[in-house]
Image (tube, grey):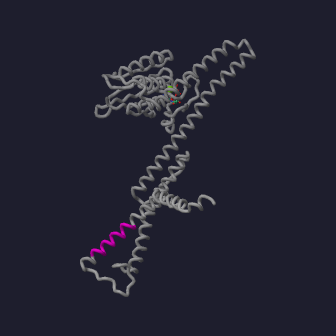
Amino acid sequence: MDSECARPGLPIAGRLNSVRDWFKGRLFWKLLLALWVSMLLSIGAAIAYLRSTGQADMPPPDMASVGLLPMVPLVSGMLAMLVASVAVAWYLSGPLRHLRRGLNRVAQGDFDIRVAPLAHGRRDELTELAEDFDRMAGQLQQLTQARQILLHDISHELRSPLARMQAAIGLMRQDATLTPAMVDRIERESQRLDALIEELLTLHRLEAAPETWAVETEDVLDLLHAVAEDANFEARAASREVRIDAPGEFVASVRGELLHRAFENVIRNAVKHTAPGTVVDVQARPGEGGRGLVVSVADRGPGVPEDSLALIFEPFTRLEASAAARGVGLGLAIALRAIKLHGGSINAAPRVGGGLVVTMRLSGP
Ligand SMILES: Nc1ncnc2c1ncn2[C@@H]1O[C@H](COP(=O)(O)OP(=O)(O)OP(=O)(O)O)[C@@H](O)[C@H]1O
Ligand SMILES: [Mg+2]
């Protein structure tokens, strides 16, 4: 004889327990029960009150009744209340079921899922919640796509110098007279790799642990003057010039190293792209209402097409192929994050008469 037959009460109790657990875990049934019982109680209370105050008669003896309550209106009323309760419970718990399904799909990495269209035109807090969910799924989708593109670009960027180094080694093996030139080439490529990895680490640190850069109180305009001076030194060797017009001071608590990097990249970009014999103008003025600081760097280079003005702040965007101006393609991505970290903004615009103006806005100290 198996144990189920020997103790028939246990499996039934277990089943009852699991039904009770399932019932407890379902919002729909809880709402249904709560609504139905509350309607029954309020009607029961109303009838009891009317009876006790003599405002309603007892049911006639020939009418089917339960105590004071007549059966037919009682059953039809209970059925009507049940239907109304089912409708309300369904209406309230339906969107939550869609949301739950959506969250499960997101947890499995499917960011395509959208739940707001399932609301079918209703407008309430639950629909707003569904819209918030869709926004979150959209942002997660963008982030993962950006990560995938970045990973692909990084692999490609790391591979190119390595491939060139391997080619140089191959040529060296075939022809020993090429050795000095190939060693130079390998050195250049390894420097390029080093610069790329350094910029990648900076970009990663800016996103993952920006607090690791020390905050110091310093004059941002001093910093700008120092960067412009260094850039001018290099520019003059290439028959270009950097002129700075940044009077006064702007003392603030900043991550100086990061601002230095941002200024340096923008000014060096301008020097790299401006035409020979032209001047790069660096200007700093107080922001609107005398608050904050606006730094602009204007050159006389080829500029950037209108539809790429925002794109140049994305990692690995390089628009021109000229070897002299070729960089890693991370400078402006780092500058954007560095300026944003200081509550500011950076943008690029065409310069009247030709060239590019990059404007960095910093909020007040
Ligand atoms: N002043 C400018 N004039 C014209 N094009 C520019 C200018 N500044 C940036 N660009 C374009 O934007 C791209 C991205 O600039 P970014 O500074 O991010 O990278 P990079 O200078 O190529 O490399 P690095 O990481 O070494 O700075 C450049 O490759 C260039 O095509
Ligand atoms: Mg650059």
**Camera-side residue of 146 and 360:** 146
Q: Is residue 318 left or right of residue 82?
A: right
Q: Give the range drawn in magenta.
A: 36-49
> Eyeballing the image, is 174 above or below 320?
above
> Eyeballing the image, is 241 above or below 332?
above
Q: Is residue 240 magenta?
A: no
Work out which quarter of the rendered image holds the N terminus and state it: bottom right
Give the residue furthest to the bottom. 62
In percent of width and height, residue 28 lies at 45, 61
**Camera-side residue of 98 and 166:** 98
Q: Residue at x 66, y 14 (%)?
A: 181
| Residue 200 appears in the rendering | yes
> Eyeballing the image, is 361 above or below 46?
above
Work out which quarter of the rendered image holds the C terminus and state it: top left
Give the residue furthest to the right. 174
In percent of width and height, residue 264 lies at 45, 23
The image quarter containing residue 56 is bottom left
In percent of width and height, residue 202 lies at 49, 26
Give the main secondary structure, helix, strand or loop, of the magenta stretch. Answer: helix
Q: Which residue is drawn at 50% across and 33% down?
A: 312
Q: Is residue 291 left or right of residue 103?
A: left
In percent of width and height, residue 60 lies at 34, 86
Q: Is residue 77 left or right of residue 268?
A: left
